[in-house]
Amino acid sequence: MAFFSSGSRTLVEILMRMQSAERPMPVDHTFFEFGSIRYHVEAPVSDPENVFLSISTPSLSHEASPSSGGLPEATLQETRKTYHKFAEVVEPPREGFVLTLKLNFSGLNRPKDRVKAINQVSLLQSVVLSSQLRDMLGSLGSSGTMKLVYNQREPFFVSRTAEKINAVFPMRFRDDTDLAIATSFFQVRARLASFFSVALPLPRTSTAPHRPFRV
């Protein structure tokens, strides 16, 4: 599962190589990260100052997916705000992608400013996903529960009450050994919680579930 705070190393390498090239180099490259995030980088020779970056990210929730397959307006606004110094949102995006940016670093004269901008661009998937998550949690009712599927093998659930938002990460237990280890862990964790007043309460059952619940 990708972390929201992690950047794309491959994207940094591609953009840095393009910036350090002595002459404009054409680029038309597609690559994947974390198995489900797809990038496309295009830099035509006829337009050497502009780099077109497209990204396709998985939907965090099928329940909240926009019917058009595009990004919510709030996410687009957040992206414009974050990258307004050197990028524009291209509408509509490249076919098959949810977002396309036109990057232009020519206005950044100092090399360190360009490096900073490139590192900021590498966090694009973090900007998109965190904005989507914030919008979804804001619209989640006080009695609602939502299943988030960033990775098909690692779904989790969020629910909201008047005071807090709960996140539930299901665990799979394959055999009796896993059950014994998990039960022991929960028992130790519960005992430790009783010694520390600042520890969060951990409700548990006498036996660990064999498989995660479904909503």
Image (cartoon, rainbow, N blue to C red):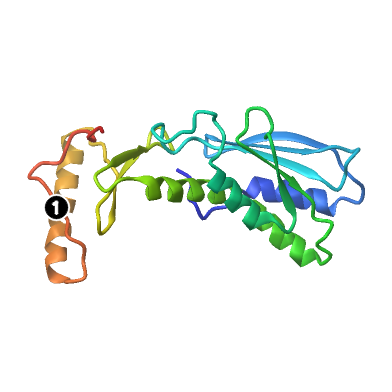
Residue 92, above or below 50: above
Q: Position of residue 2 (x, y in %)?
A: 48, 45
On-image quarter of the N terminus: top left
Residue 195, above or below 206: below
Q: Position of residue 10 (x, y in %)?
A: 66, 45
Q: Nearer the viewer, residue 176 or 153?
A: 153
Count the labels in the image. 1
Report the residue that reaches farthest toward the left: 206
Q: Nearer the viewer, residue 159 or 203?
A: 159
Tell me the kind of residue under disc 1: Pro
Q: Is residue 82 left or right of residue 134?
A: right
Q: Is residue 198 left or right of residue 100?
A: left
Image-quadrant location for residue 208: top left
Image-quadrant location for residue 207: top left
| Element on which disc 1 rests | loop
Q: Position of residue 45 (x, y in %)?
A: 89, 38
Q: Residue at x 38, y 46 (%)?
A: 139
Image-quadrant location for residue 163: bottom left
Q: Residue at x 76, y 52 (%)?
A: 16
Q: Position of residue 201 (x, y in %)?
A: 17, 60
Q: Nearer the viewer, residue 86 or 23?
A: 86
Q: Is residue 131 left or right of residue 109?
A: left
- Residue 165 seen in render: yes
Q: Answer few, some or many: residues within 10 Å of disc 1's Cα (few below 14, many 20 plus, some between 14 and 19).
A: few
Q: Residue at x 70, y 62 (%)?
A: 116
Q: Which residue is mark 1?
A: 203
- Residue 155 seen in render: no
Residue 196, above or below 164: below
Q: Is residue 92 left or right of residue 142?
A: right
